[in-house]
Amino acid sequence: MRLSSRLTSLSALALALTAVTPALALAQNKPEDSYTRLEINGSGSVKAAPDQLIARFRAESRDKTAAAAQKAVNTLVHHAVEQSAKTAGVKAAVLEYSVSENRPDKAPASWTASQALTFTAPDGSALLPLTGDLQGEGLMLEDLSWSLSPENQKKLTLDAEKNAVEDLKKQADTLAASLGLHVVRFATVSMSSGGFPRPVMMMAMAARGPAADSAPPPSSTAEVQTVRATAHATVLLAP
């Protein structure tokens, strides 16, 4: 009797599973057209202090001959790089070099040589005094820019994207409830960054002549920067 009763129970369970399985399959294979579709946009942001300061310089000289102009520029750049190498935490990059002939009306021709160089540091404690020294030696400071390093920018962008996704989820749940529905799933999600924050820039002119020796170095404030991300999603809703 016990064996017969057990077989009967197993048979009933098998029949029940046979009846339920097609229903589950139908639910899983339900076409998206049968759902209510909700299109939403989300946004996220994070704030962080900048972690690098960049000073952009230009060494420039004009002279009667190309050789003389280039010699002056080469000397300025060489000395600037030597000084930066003695300054802890500062990285130098020597960039574009150009030479051009100048032919003004009713004046002798001359040559202009020019080269760009940048100095990067995690803060201004060493870079700002160096910047003042280089200004005093005749290099033109084109700008000072606080920004986020590429590594920090990448991490913060991911955090902003996570916040944008959380915003999507909150919106989807709230709007579905207001419609008397519930969220089945997110059909599509697309992300886009809000672009890199603009560097906090301070324009500066070259400091030349004897007065530069006693002039203070330039100043620059490291203002908090914001990294933003946006998201778009298609959400499927059902009763």
Image (tube, rainbow, N blue to C red):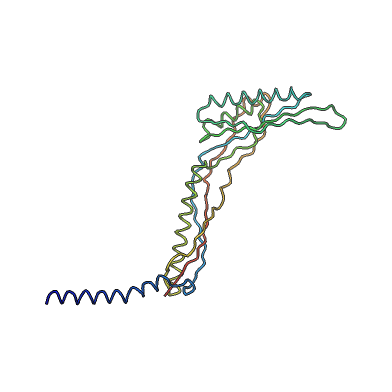
Q: Nearer the viewer, residue 2 or 63?
A: 2
141 with respect to 33 (left or right): right
On screen, residue 211 above or below 161: above
The single residue placed furthest to the left in the displayed view is 1
181 with respect to 215 (left or right): left
Of the 4 image quadrants, the one containing the C terminus is bottom left
Residue 116 placement: quadrant: top right
Residue 170 percent across, percent down from the top left:
44, 63
Of the 4 image quadrants, the one containing the N terminus is bottom left
74 with respect to 91 (left or right): right
Residue at x-position 52% and y-position 42%: 150
Residue at x-position 54% and y-position 53%: 193
Residue at x-position 31% and y-position 75%: 18
15 with respect to 118 (left or right): left
Q: Nearer the viewer, residue 62 or 192?
A: 192
On screen, residue 30 above or below 48: below
Q: Nearer the viewer, residue 135 or 175?
A: 175
Q: Nearer the viewer, residue 112 or 15?
A: 15
The single residue placed furthest to the right in the displayed view is 106
Residue 224 percent across, percent down from the top left:
51, 45
Residue at x-position 47% and y-position 75%: 34
On screen, residue 152 above or below 58: below
Residue 28 percent across, percent down from the top left:
40, 70
Image label count: 0
Residue 190 percent across, percent down from the top left:
51, 59
